Image (cartoon, rainbow, N blue to C red):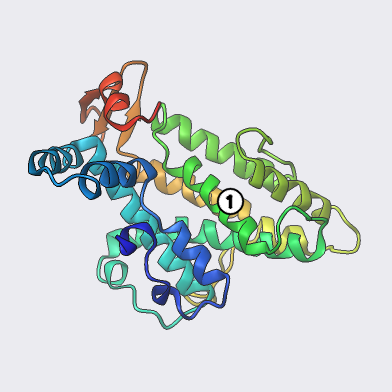
Amino acid sequence: MTDLILPALSEYQKAPPPADYILANLSNPPRYIFEQYVKKIVHSDNAEVQEEFCHWLSHPVAAADHALWSQWVCILKWLYKKRWHPKLKLIEIDKNRKTRDSLECFADLLHSALLVCEQCYLYGDVSSYAHHLYWFRDIALELRIICFDFPANKEQLVQKLRTIAQQIKLVENPFNPIDHPALWELMNVATELATSPSYKGFRGKYLVKKKSNQQKQSVYEIGLGTAFSAVASRIQKDHNLVSMETSADKISLNSGSGRGRKILVQKLFFESITGQRL
């Protein structure tokens, strides 16, 4: 049970508190999968009920969501490597070039958001968090929703990410306080710093900076707007990254490029088994 609720802090032992706790907390599995696990397995000795849960978890939609969570944990470990433990060996990534190419831009996005968060907390007017990493936790969760939630379609997601990137590069706030309060606050402070005469280098270093050929593979830094652009480009090129799309009454799986699409499940059924509205 402990591993499922909260991965061992020893996985992130090179990160000082509270970074170790924040990374472990962000590594939690999807809430509805965990709740179903507790309900069906922990609180039941009935073998049929446990078999029912295993059958439910093997459903393509639940399995796909579980796979997205696994990718998310790999991204968090990559962030841990970039920020706190550069000598860490990421076996699941380093041995698979395709996986590395697919996930690197997401690790860059989290890393750039962390750098902006640190600067905004240090030099801006932020009083709602006791530590910048608690703020970053909320920022990371909102980024996960933006990048990994079931989209209406991939084209809309790519356009949304490119619009966000463009507004950040123009020193505008693309977020609203209702849907993304942590990101909205981040960009409010960031735009103030970027336009402040006392911090002239903020925009160039933390919002629009690009990766240079001289920077080493694991330690480079890019701006937040640049990172959003890179995620949009990667999602557009790689159909496996956003394999699920949702419409009014069904969820589809993109099983290939072009017309390679398969209807998996009616939305009402998905909502009934997960309790999660789409």
Q: Position of residue 99 (x, y in %)?
A: 30, 59
Q: Nearer the viewer, residue 82 or 48?
A: 48
Q: Nearer the viewer, residue 105 or 80?
A: 80
- Is 190 on the left-hand or right-hand side of 266? right
Q: Residue drawn 32% across and 64% down?
A: 3
Question: Which three-letter amino acid code belongs to the residue tagged 1?
Answer: Asp
What percent of the width, then of the height, locates residue 194? 80, 55
Q: Quadrant of the C terminus?
A: top left
Residue matched to label 1: 138
Which residue lies most toward the top here?
A: 248
Q: Where is residue 60 drawn, in percent x and y?
A: 20, 37
Question: Between residues 211 and 245, which one lies in front from this camera angle?
Answer: 245
| Residue at disc 1, secondary structure | helix
Residue 200 placement: quadrant: bottom right
Where residue 199 sits: x, y (%)? Answer: 84, 63
Circle 1 crowding by C-alpha within 10 Å: few under 14, some 14–19, many from 20 = some
Q: Residue at x 36, y 20 (%)?
A: 247
Residue at image location 75% in from the left, 59% down from the top? 120
Question: Residue at coordinates 21% horizontally, 31% vertically from top-left?
Answer: 260
- Residue 72: quadrant of the picture: bottom left
